[in-house]
Amino acid sequence: MQIVKKSASEVPAYVTSIITDQLNQKKNSILGLATGSTPLAIYKYWIEEFKQGNLDFSQAISFNLDEYVNLPASDPRSYNYYMKENLFQHINIDQNNTHIPNGQAESLQEECARYDQRIQEFGGIDLQILGIGLNGHIGFNEPSNELLLNTHVTPLSESTRIANSRFFDHIDQVPTQAITMGIGSIFKAKKIILIAMGVEKSEIVKQAFLGNITTQVPASLLQLHHNVEIVVDTDCGKLIT
Ligand code: PGA
């Protein structure tokens, strides 16, 4: 595991250089993508680089980490909508090559199994982008006594619903369940970049990457992955020397 500290303004360019190398090496890379506030500046940078002709997504394939259960793709708070709005519609990725779990599938169990199968059919994720929740979650793998390996339906913890209520008018509107790639699905990625920004994430980042490995801080398991880079801005990395 490598921890890389950059100024907040350097983080998007730094992460973009990794994705550019990845796509230069393998045009049809399988990218694992995340939502939330953290990737926004990074996706903006990808769009700029694409416009400059420095990034080509024409053969890239993407799989998103998670999606709310029972929020239509047309809902602006869905991750489906987020991805189109903040990335896909601005770059040359083939929409047929983008994958997001369907939180409205008739059988959510079948949807989860199909999602993992699809990732494997494509040969597994080459580069996974991750954020980290204030409670240490990755994807929606919430702190728990046990963590599930495969893509699954999960209840959202109270702290996650509170954190995400900023996108909704009222906390009661925040879905109570989501589909998320499991810890095993994430661990199969050949390379993982976790990005954490801002002072409010500094304590959990310290716990996750300098502390013991525990399922109560799901991100801490990444210490065991063979190729993971933690990219933090100076505020977030202030407790890490
Ligand atoms: P954030 O979410 O980027 O909005 O802080 C990160 C996460 O919950 O994984």
Image: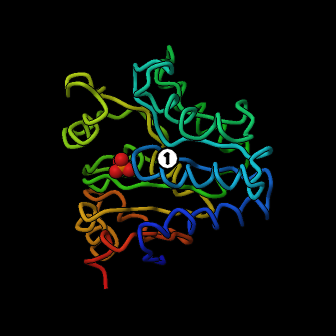
Query: Residue, x 72% and y 66% (percent of image)?
Result: 21
Q: Judge left or right: residue 61 versus residue 133.
A: right
Residue 40 image position (x, y, % from top left): 47, 48
Q: Name the residue under label 1.
A: 34
Q: Which residue is more in the foreground, 124 or 175?
A: 175
Q: Residue furthest bottom?
A: 241
Where in the figure is residue 9, as x and y percent of width and height? 46, 67
- Residue at 70% x, 31% y: name it: 95
**Is 199 positioned to the left or the right of 71 in the image?**
left
In this orientation, which residue lies closer to the viewer: 168 or 180? 168
Viewer-proximal residue among 176 and 197: 197
Q: What residue type is labelled 1?
A: Ala
In this figure, which colouring scheme has been used for the structure?
rainbow
Q: Is mark 1 on a helix, strand or loop?
A: loop
Q: Where is 137 relative to 17, above or below? A: above
Q: Which residue is drawn at 62% across and 53% down?
A: 46
Q: Position of residue 74 (x, y in %)?
A: 50, 18
Q: Count of labels shown? A: 1
Choose between 161 and 221: the one closer to the eye. 161
For the C terminus, the image quarter is bottom left
- How many C-alpha atoms fall within 10 Å of the one at disc 1: few (<14), some, or many (≥20)? many
Coordinates of residue 113 in the picture (x, y in percent): 56, 32
Some atom of ligand 1 lies within 8 Å of the CB belonging to the residue at label 1:
yes
Residue occupying image coordinates x 33% and y 29%? 177
Q: In this view, does 192 lie above or below 119?
A: below
Extreme residue toward the top, this view:
106
Q: Is residue 121 left or right of residue 73?
A: right
